[in-house]
Every structure is written in structure tokens, then in C-alpha cells.
Amino acid sequence: MVVSADGSAVPNAAGDTREVRVEELVGRRLCDVDGRKVGRIEELVAERRGTDWVVIEVHVGPGALLERIVDLSTLFPLLSTLERRLRKRYRIPWEQLDLTNPARPKATVAAATLGRVDA
């Protein structure tokens, strides 16, 4: 999804200008192509390209929630305790998402192939 500086949607390569609001996605449960639960969408990452903002990936899972709430550098003494939870974090490229139904977002690939981030 590309959003221009004035907030209007910019067509993608297929000419699609459908808007999806961030608040419709954050907190939604994401499933993979086989219907298996991956986790909840906790964060969207965008970068500026000219005058547009382009969403490049989403962060999913309990570790992504923790990443959103707290700067991990402040948790250094607790990392060993949280290590197992922090491993459950995925960075999923925007191109690997199917948002035809924003209420039920899906990854277009199997969970085993998603970009897992290890703490």
C-alpha cells in the first residue's frame, strides 16, 4: 500500500487504490495460506519514498507486541526470562499479505517460510 503525503491512496502496479486503515489491521489475527494461526499484527513498518509513505512489512507475534511497547535495550537484564516469547516474532513483507478481507488478513505463504526474527 502506498499513501501520498496528502493521505490519498496511490495506485499500485496493478492499479489498485483500495485503502486499508492501520487501525483495521493492528491487533488482527494473521493466518498463513493454509489457515494456520501465525500471530497478531502488532506493527506496520513504512518508509518514505519521495512524497509517499510505503508500507514495507508488518511485525507479527508476541515479540512484536513487546517490541512495540518497550524499547528492548531497557530489558537487557530480563532478556533471558523473555527469550522464549521474543522468538515468536515475524517480519512479513507487505507483498506476502492478502488483504482482500482486512478483517481476516492472510499471509500468501506457509508459516514455515515466513521471516522469523530470533532475539
Image (cartoon, rainbow, N blue to C red):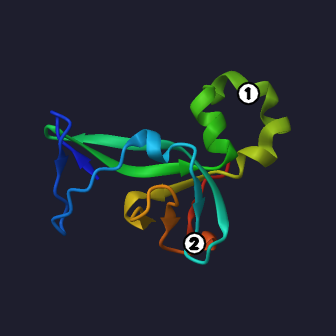
- Residue drawn at 71 percent across, 51 percent down: 87
Q: In which quarter of the image is residue 112?
A: bottom right
Give the label, 1 or 2, closer to the camera. 2
* x and y, in percent, of residue 98 in the image: 42, 66
Earlier in the chain: of badge 1 and badge 2, it is: 1
Could you give the CA–CA distance between mark 1 and mark 2, rounded to whole angstroms? 29 Å
Furthest toward the right, the residue is: 81
Against 65, residue 118 (above or below) is below
The C terminus appears in which quarter of the rendering?
top right
Dot 1: what SS? helix
Q: Residue 112 or 28: which is nearer the viewer?
A: 28
Q: What element carries label 2?
A: helix
Q: Mark 2 points at which residue?
A: 113
Residue 26 coordinates in the image, percent (x, y): 51, 43
Q: Give the label on residue 76, or none.
A: 1
Place residue 7 in its image quadrant.
top left
Q: Say which quarter of the image contains residue 39.
A: bottom right
Horizontal relation, residue 8 to residue 42: left or right: left
Q: For the residue marked with disc 2, what is the amino acid?
A: Thr
